[in-house]
Image (tube, rainbow, N blue to C red):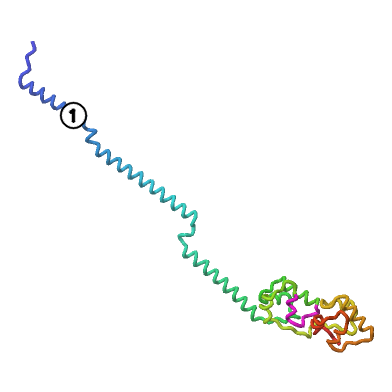
Amino acid sequence: MNAKPTRNQWKGYAIICLILSLALLAMIFRPALQKTPQNNDHSQLKSAIDSFGNNIISKSEAARKNRYYPNRHDTTTHYKRHRNADYSQHREIQSREITKRQLTIELNSADTSELQKLYGIGPVFANRIVKYRQLLGGYVRREQLMEVYGMDAERYDGIAGNITVDTSLAKKLDINNASIAELRQHPYIDYYQAKAIVNFRRQGNRFSKQSDLLLVNLMDEETVTKLQGYIQF
């Protein structure tokens, strides 16, 4: 037969049950006790995510600025470099223009390269000036440059002070002996005027002065004035 538990044994059983109960309660309430650490872990994770996101945004913003403003980080140096280059170029152009304005060109002896030294005269105008000089037989007045194709008052005013004219180099027309073909070669005399001059001579008339040309039919005062310096008597 089994003996009944003693009083001390019952006390032991009670203590064991109490311990087991406390252990069971600890297991049940442990998640609640760990709630605060879990929240701390969540806060750290959130902070890490926010930091990562801010880093991505910063890099994206920097990439955008570099794309649209590649020289923004060196704006001052960039500006100074271009400003110095523009200033040097301006001074060089200004120096060339001053040099051109100080030149003196003789209109009847200058070639195209010399004419291009004049302010505002390039190769095109230099060629036109020489070709018209050949038609005239030489210039007798610098104002005749206004008759060159494309010449305007502004361009002429820019070079008028740099021009001299040696009239002795201009070709003269022997008005009392020149043929119709020779007379009409001059740009101031057309075919009909040349023929009228020759017919006037055939009538026994001679020219002794500039104004005698006004006696010829078809010769007007403007044409006679323009021919001054080209007529030889």
**Residue lying at 23% horizontally and 34% vertically, measured from the top left:** 32
76 falls in the magenta region = no
- Residue 140 in the image: x percent, y percent? 77, 83
The answer to whether 28 is drawn above or below residue 212 in the figure is: above
Please name whichever residue, 24 or 213, is drawn nearer the observer in this view of the structure: 213
Instruction: Name the quarter where the C terminus is drawn.
Output: bottom right
Residue 185 location, x and y as percent? 85, 76
Tell me what residue is drawn at x 55 percent, y 69 percent: 86
In the shown orientation, is residue 9 left or right of residue 95?
left
Q: Which residues are magenta?
A: 136-147
Q: Which of the 4 image quarters holds residue 158? A: bottom right
Q: In the depicted view, which residue is nearer to us: 30 or 223?
A: 223
Three-letter amino acid code of the residue under disc 1 = Leu
Provide residue 204's location: percent of width, then percent of height: 94, 86
Q: Quadrant of residue 113?
A: bottom right
Q: Which structural element holds mark 1?
A: helix
- Would you place residue 70 above or below residue 113 in this image? above
The mark total stands at: 1
- Residue to which mark 1 is pinned: 25
Image quarter in which the N terminus is found:
top left
